Amino acid sequence: MNAVTNIPCNSALMLSQGLLAGHFTRAEQLQILSPEGSVIATLANPAAAEGCHGKQGLLDALAHHQVGQLVVRNIGERMLGRLLAANIRVLQCRSARLPLPALLAPANLQPLTEASQGRPSRRHQSKAAIRAIQPVGTGQSHADCHGGCNSNSGHCCASGGN
């Protein structure tokens, strides 16, 4: 993988069905490559089914294997921010259907340097919207809450005492 960067470090790919996964945390496997491009390890992706704990497990696995760069197809902005904060270089692959040598060619990779380059988290946005909902009597309608008020949802009506 030396063609990708001049800094020798272990690299990681997120794979599903033997190909670069379409989404970083939903990949089936994490494959660790040496600076020379040989496979060091192939692990089950801890983030695939365990939510926040699994995502932390994935970050721990990257740290344990001394991964300095990661090739992704798509990644969320929050995870991208965490990887960048951990000083892991993230490269987005323009075409995931290429065989491995071509997949890692510099012309096929674009460095991601800011969290905003990742996909926005729909789940995180909806949680922020829920927190922004004001209790009854403050001028905000329950109709603004996920298409209407549902006292069983625990979203807006529970805070308004309805």
Image: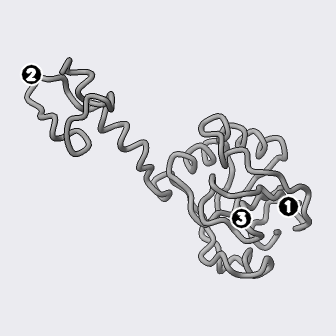
Q: Residue at x 56, y 57 (%)?
A: 75
State the image quarter where residue 21 is shown. Answer: bottom right
Q: According to the image, label 1 marks what residue?
A: 33
Q: Secondary structure at mark 3?
A: strand
- Mark 3 and mark 2 lie on one chain; the one further toward the N terminus is 3
Judge left or right: residue 148 versus residue 113.
Answer: left
Q: CA distance from mark 3 to mark 2?
A: 50 Å
Q: Residues within 10 Å of mark 1 (few under 14, many from 20)?
A: many
Q: According to the image, label 2 marks what residue?
A: 137
The number of discs equals 3
Render colour scheme: one colour
Q: Residue 118 got which mark?
A: none
Judge left or right: residue 29 versus residue 33.
Answer: left
State the image quarter where residue 15 is shown. Answer: bottom right
Q: Residues within 10 Å of mark 2 (few under 14, many from 20)?
A: few
Amino acid beneath label 3: Ser
Residue 13: image location, x then y, percent: 74, 61
Residue 38: image location, x then y, percent: 91, 66
Q: Residues within 10 Å of mark 3 (few under 14, many from 20)?
A: some
Q: Residue at x 61, y 48 (%)?
A: 84
Q: Residue at x 64, y 72 (%)?
A: 109
Taking depth in this image into account, of 35 and 101 the one nearest to the observer is: 101
Q: Secondary structure at mark 1?
A: strand
Instruction: Locate the N terminus and report the quarter of the image it occupies.
Output: bottom right
Amino acid beneath label 1: Leu
Instruction: Locate the C terminus and report the quarter of the image it occupies.
Output: top left
Judge left or right: residue 51 versus residue 35.
Answer: left
Residue 20: image location, x then y, percent: 70, 68
Q: Residue at x 31, y 29 (%)?
A: 152
Taking depth in this image into account, of 42 and 111 the one nearest to the observer is: 42
Q: CA distance from mark 3 to mark 1?
A: 16 Å
Q: Residue 16 got which mark?
A: 3
